[in-house]
Amino acid sequence: MLKSELYYDLLVEEVSSILLSSPLLLKIDMLPLSQLRYVFSQLYYFVDLFPGLLAALLWQCPDERIRFAIVENLVDECGGIEKINARDFTATHSGLLKKFVMRLDRNNPLFPTKGIEVDILINSFKKLFIYSSHIEALGAMASMEGMSTKWFGLIYEKLLNRHEFSSSDLLFFEIHLQIDDGHGNAFKEVLMPLLKNKNDFVLLRHGILTSVNIWKTFYENLAEVIFERN
């Protein structure tokens, strides 16, 4: 394994432990449905934004190999090429998560409004992906996809432990368990050749740590909101 790959892998492992130790995530299987609904409604607003972050990364990175990795991810966010060709919007990732949120209270047709905690999350990621260097932005995206399987795997396991959701209900999470390792590896593959000197590694670390700290702050703010309400 190349030195750059080892450095990246260890860094992703480091930040994964930060994210996966979030007290809120560890309590997913114990939250009442009202709190669960709010948590995932706020996550929905980020998922709905996510294709825009990929587009910003596409603008940042002119290399065709990087573009292919980004476009592949964008296609999956839209439900796959067959769904795109058929103009079928039923399998977009944001749509699947929204369906899960609505399942949490079928008697309430109103979708929860966006909270200030997700505004902070979104604005922080916009700043990262628009104003940072391409190595910082690509490192942040690669690490998010690289640790996504563990991240969504933890949430999926916690939701299964509740014994109240079907496989259809949890389709958003199941899909991510199937595809995110592939996206993470694709981003890692195109990222490694960019790391040519010490400054590049500094930028990589900064982008990845910035990303995970944005998420850490989001979950802390979210926990404060939902536990203050009850």
Image (tube, rainbow, N blue to C red):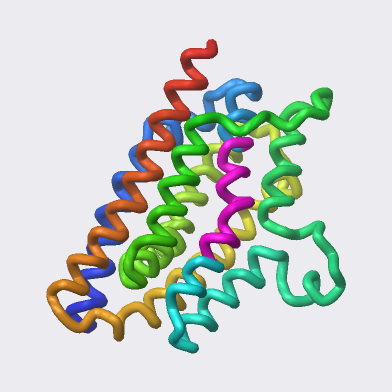
Question: Residue 215's spot in the image, x, y percent?
Answer: 40, 44
Question: Residue 8's spot in the image, x, y percent?
Answer: 26, 69
**Magenta-drawn stretch contains 53:** yes
Residue located 65% across and 24% down the image: 33
**Magenta-drawn stretch contains 97:** no
> From the viewer's perspective, is residue 160 above or below residue 129?
above
Segment colored magenta? 41-54
Q: Taking 202 as reference, is 79 left or right?
A: right
The foreground one among 25 and 79 is: 79
Residue located 58% across and 60% down the image: 52
Determine the residue located farthest toward the bottom in the rendered image: 64
Q: Taking 107 as reference, is 199 left or right?
A: left
Magenta: main secondary structure: helix
Determine the residue located farthest toward the left in the rendered image: 198
> From the viewer's perspective, is residue 198 above or below residue 140?
below
Residue located 23% across and 82% down the image: 1
Question: Which quadrant of the structure image shows residue 90?
Answer: bottom right
